[in-house]
Image (cartoon, rainbow, N blue to C red):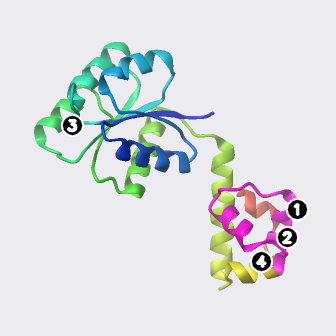
Amino acid sequence: MSIRILVVDDKEDNADYIKHLLAHEGYLADTLTDATLTIQQLKSVEYHMIILDMMMPKMDGVEVLKRIREVDTDIAIVVATAYPNVDSAIASLKASAADYVKKPIEPDSFLEIVRRVLETKGIHRNPEVELHKFIGRFIRESRMQQGLTLKQLARRTGLSVSLLSQIERAESSASISSLYKIATALGVQMSQLFGDA
């Protein structure tokens, strides 16, 4: 299942940065820089989550949050702000925001919040994306435990450094043939690459 997330932030740079972080993790993300269009957008596209900036012109995040809740009481909402304070946190929680993040966004903790909030809602990402990540992580950890560089693994497998790097970062799906070469070069069972140790 593809998870679709709407990023509402009046600053285009911020919205694009968050979209990039989400896209890199395999989420489908749309951006909206005019908060007054949020409800219209929610009615035209089915979203699993909204990342909502608190400080925006025309309509602040608390008002947008209240309006969202009038049309959708279940959608996961994560509030983001560069100016966290007790009042906005309380208002966000009263309007059922799932979590609250401080800007500038720290990528790892932000993505962890997104994952946790989605899991709390019972929403899980595309299993294929998760598999690619598991395979990439397993290959990287096995290679590093053996003290091998990407270049050395490339020499052992006949695969390019670029392809190996993309596989480790889960940016490219490897063929069965490539995975077999990698498993052989690392001295591991092919099944271990799929989490079936």
Q: Are marks 1 and 2 in contact (CB under 8 Å)?
A: yes
Q: Is residue 191 visible?
A: yes
Q: For the N terminus, give its image quadrant.
A: top right
Circle count: 4
As for residue 160 lying within the magenta part, the answer is yes
What distance separates the C-alpha of mark 3 from that of mark 2? 52 Å
Which of discs 1 and 4 lies nearer the camera? The answer is 4
Tag 1 residue: 177
| Residue range corresponding to the magenta coloring | 156-184
Q: Along the line of sight, which residue is nearer the eye, 21 or 108? A: 21
Tag 3 residue: 55
Residue 73 pos. (x, y %): 36, 19
Determine crowd level at label 2: few under 14, some 14-19, many 20+ residues with C-alpha closer than 10 A.
some
Which of discs 2 and 4 lies nearer the camera? The answer is 4
Tag 2 residue: 181
Residue 40, picture quadrant: top left
Where disc 3 sits, the SS reads loop
What distance separates the C-alpha of mark 1 from that of mark 2? 6 Å
**Going by the picture, which residue comes out furthest to the front?**
12
What distance separates the C-alpha of mark 1 from that of mark 3? 51 Å
Where disc 4 sits, the SS reads helix
Tag 4 residue: 154
Mark with earlier residue (3, 2) = 3
Mark with earlier residue (1, 4) = 4
Residue lying at 69% horizontally and 45% vertically, measured from the top left: 128
Q: Along the line of sight, which residue is nearer the eye, 94 or 16? A: 16
Where disc 2 sits, the SS reads helix
